């Protein structure tokens, strides 16, 4: 199938941290898949990511919502994802596919929290308090519906920091979650069918 390549967003100062906002915290939706049809350009091969994810993880379809990310990508881009978690998450569609994998493992709260922190760090100072409270209640609080796996000390420290919030008050927790994904979920993702089949199919398409 022919497709347009996806552009890669610019990285921010903190290693492994990128700009994107989860659907819970921003008006513009960021979810796993996009309903918009992308234009196809000649001599560029790719794959419809939406159709692929539906075929790999059928139970995700009921929860799919539109996003601004494109559905078409190239084999070269997908190969770059195996270089590091940073490379994977630098790509908007990489975030989507990795998010799908995490959802299949019931650990999607990790990437959602991580992306929420990136959105939070770009928040204007007068809005920090309200957004910090939302993130804390959604992911950090001991009764949070999508509680992240961090130690008690970090959880308590974060609770204190949001009382006088700054753009960096979630950094400690965010680093722990990033390291957890890097050491645990990311290696499994690279060995998973969702990644290997996607890469193999894209490479096969590029030879046609």
Image: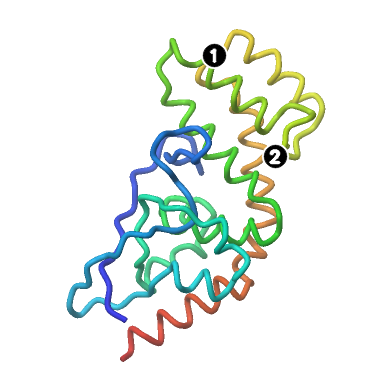
Q: Secondary structure at mark 1?
A: helix
Residue under the image location 39 percent in, 58 percent down: 34
> Farthest residue in the right direction?
152
Q: Which residue is mark 2?
A: 146
Q: Which image quarter holds the C terminus?
A: bottom left
Left-right relation of 52 to 191: left
Q: Position of residue 60 (x, y in %)?
A: 59, 62
Q: Position of residue 24 (x, y in %)?
A: 53, 36
Q: Quadrant of residue 114?
A: top right
Closest to the observer, 105 or 169: 105
What label does residue 129 carry, if any? 1
Query: Alpha-carbon neighbours of circle 1 within 10 Å: few (<14), some, or many (≥20)?
Result: some
Real-space Cα distance between discs 1 and 2?
20 Å
Q: Quadrant of residue 33?
A: bottom left
Query: Alpha-carbon neighbours of circle 2 within 10 Å: few (<14), some, or many (≥20)?
Result: some
Closest to the observer, 140 or 18: 140
Q: Secondary structure at mark 2?
A: loop
Residue under the image location 67 percent in, 26 percent down: 137
Closest to the observer, 102 or 89: 102
Is tag 1's residue or tag 2's residue first in the polypeptide sequence? 1
Q: Position of residue 37 (x, y in %)?
A: 29, 65
Query: Above or below — where is 190 with respect to 176?
Result: below
Closest to the observer, 87 or 22: 22
Query: Above or below — where is 59 with respect to 134?
Result: below
């Amino acid at each position: 199938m022919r497709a347009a390549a996806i552009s890669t967003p610019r990285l921010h100062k903190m290693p492994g941290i990128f700009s994107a906002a989860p659907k819970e915290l921003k008006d513009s939706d960021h979810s796993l898949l996009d309903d918009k049809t992308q234009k196809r350009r000649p001599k560029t091969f790719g794959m419809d990511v939406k159709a692929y994810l539906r075929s790999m993880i059928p139970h995700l379809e009921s929860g799919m919502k539109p996003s601004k990310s494109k559905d078409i990508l190239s084999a070269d881009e997908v190969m770059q994802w195996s270089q590091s978690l940073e490379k994977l998450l630098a790509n908007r569609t990489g975030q989507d596919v990795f998010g799908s994998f995490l959802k299949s493992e019931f650990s999607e709260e990790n990437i959602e929290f991580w992306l929420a922190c990136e959105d939070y760090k770009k928040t204007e100072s007068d809005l920090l308090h309200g957004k910090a409270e939302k993130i804390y209640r959604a992911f950090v609080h001991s009764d949070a519906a999508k509680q992240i796996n961090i130690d008690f000390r970090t959880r308590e420290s974060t609770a204190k920091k949001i009382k006088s919030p700054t753009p960096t008050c979630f950094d400690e927790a965010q680093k722990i979650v990033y390291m957890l994904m890097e050491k645990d979920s990311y290696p499994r993702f690279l060995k998973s069918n969702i990644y290997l089949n996607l890469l193999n199919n894209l490479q096969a398409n590029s030879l046609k």
